[in-house]
Image (cartoon, rainbow, N blue to C red):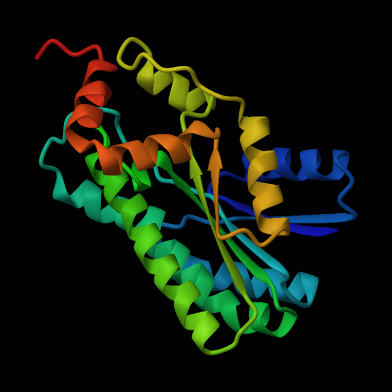
Amino acid sequence: MHVWVSHLFPFISGKVADKCLELGAKNVRSIAADMADPRNPKRVVQFALEKLGGLDYLVLNHIGATPFQMWDRDSEHTRWLMQVNFLSFVELAGAALPFLTKSNGSIVVVSSLCGKIATPFTASYSATKFALGGFFTSLRHELAMQRKHVSVTLCFLGLIDTQSTLEKIQGILSMQPYPASDSALAIIKGGMTRAREIYFPWWVDLVSKLHDWFPEASDQMIRNAYNYSG
């Protein structure tokens, strides 16, 4: 397996590359790229094609930093976050799609429970995740209508125990986080099996359905999980 890794910070790309090699990848390349710059998605795909010769999988799993707090009416931050969390996904997919079409490849889009249910303190973040669901679900339809055998897998994740997430929610949200390694495995399995959607942990799917059936009760339960006095 040949892997191409992109991250804003070179030292993180290097760590991911080392882990991929440890897990058995034959060749790993990395590039530092800021997805807030609209020029970079196309550049990243072009670099990957030059080194790999083609693409089988495109895994979109980057996010911009955003505070876990009440919306402060900062529309500029929302606009910036849309570029990083949504538009760059679209730009990467657009640049890669001709080559994924040739290989009958797969697009794997990492989203969140916040892309199914909007929650407090995540207004801008939730907006980007809902946008991902709308765009890539529509794209899946269009690929099928054109008889292009490119799968689109949407991954809806619950609370994951990354360091940045744990620091943000400390003292605010009463919820059990789940291991990042397990979520990564679920994402890989979803992409490999060309699943339409995957939910991790399993209850994310159930919670989404319950919110559709009982929205007011579900909203109250969500608010009760927050330590907020007003």
The answer to whether residue 79 is left or right of residue 191 is left
Percent x, y of residue 137 = 43, 67
The answer to whether residue 129 is left or right of residue 218 is right
Which part of the image, by quadrant, shows the C terminus? top left
Residue 221 occupies quadrant: top left
Q: Is residue 140 above or below residue 58?
A: below
Which part of the image, by quadrant, shows the N terminus? bottom right
The answer, for residue 199, to whether it is visible in the render is yes
Task: Say which residue appears at 42% left-offset and 19% top-offset.
Answer: 167
Percent x, y of residue 89 = 46, 63
Task: Say which residue appears at 40% left-offset and 73% top-offset.
Answer: 138
Percent x, y of residue 193 = 71, 58
How many badges with numbers are in the image?
0
Q: Is residue 106 above or below residue 204?
A: below
Q: Residue furthest front?
A: 213
The answer to whether residue 109 is left or right of residue 84 is right
Q: Is residue 86 above or below residue 164?
A: below
Task: Say which residue appears at 21% left-offset and 28% top-offset.
Answer: 217
Q: Residue furthest bottom?
A: 146
The answer, for residue 11, to whether it is visible in the render is no
Residue 186 occupies quadrant: top right
Task: Say which residue appears at 55% left-offset and 34% top-offset.
Answer: 202
Q: 214 and 14: which one is in front?
A: 214
The answer to whether residue 195 is left or right of residue 205 is right
Q: 157 and 8: which one is in front?
A: 157
Q: Is residue 96 above or below residue 201?
A: below
Percent x, y of residue 150 = 62, 75
